[in-house]
Amino acid sequence: MSRWRPPSPKGSTYITAAGAKRLTDELKQLWKVERPQVTQVVHEAAKNGDRSENGDYIYGKRRLREIDSRVRFLSKRLEVLTVVDKLPDDKSKIFFGAWVTLEDDNSNKQTYQIVGPDEYDVGQQKLSMDSPLARAMMGKRLEDEIVLKKPEGEELYYIIRIEYKPYDEV
């Protein structure tokens, strides 16, 4: 039995301007602020002699590996991302960046913004465009029905509002 797994499918390469700014800010924070601080701690800890039992040295080196790994990921990811910073011409249809309000059969309302996979956060009402619900919404219009197939059955939603906010407000 092998541990090989097929590679996961690549996520979409779209991101909002605000999402790109957050990733860029994180990269700058890690590279310009955190990494120099941790490097200094590791340097000071290395002067103390035996490194095998030096907690500051061991944990500092581990944190450096984590920072370097994240910096590498962010650098490569930011190169391939496409920043979407203009609104679509047809605002009556659901496209990337739209704020969509859905209503189910029990009159429960949910509002989501469709964003890229690098910035989704359901707690902040940001839904990845690669998610099944967002894929079902793409291209739909006001008052269209969406049928979401789940293992426990189908759920029906109605689109009751589509809104596009200027990217400098989000």
Image (cartoon, rainbow, N blue to C red):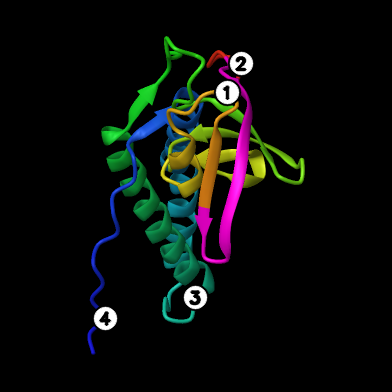
Q: Which mark identifies residue 142? A: 1
Q: Which badge, 3 or 2, comes first in the chain's sequence?
A: 3
Above-or-below relation of 143 to 127: above
Residue located 57% across and 66% down the image: 152
Location of the C terminus (image quadrant): top right
Residue located 41% across and 44% down the image: 130
Identified by mark 2, the residue type is Glu
Q: Which mark identifies residue 3? A: 4
Above-or-below relation of 5 to 44: below
> Disc 3 or disc 1, which is closer to the eye?
1
Q: Which residue is mark 2?
A: 169
Secondary structure that dominates the magenta span: strand
Q: Which badge, 2 or 1, comes first in the chain's sequence?
A: 1
Above-or-below relation of 104 to 4: above
Q: Which mark identifies residue 168? A: none
x%, y% of residue 39? Answer: 43, 53
> Disc 2 or disc 1, which is closer to the eye?
1
Above-or-below relation of 90 to 134: above
x%, y% of residue 135? Answer: 43, 41
Q: Which badge, 4 or 1, comes first in the chain's sequence?
A: 4
Identified by mark 1, the residue type is Leu
x%, y% of residue 129? Answer: 44, 39
Mark 3 surroundings: few (<14), some (14-19) or many (≥20) residues within 10 A: some
Identified by mark 4, the residue type is Arg
In depth, the one of 50 and 130 nearer the eye is: 130
In the rendered view, does 6 fall on the left or right side of 141?
A: left
Give the residues drawn in magenta, as a range.
Answer: 149-165
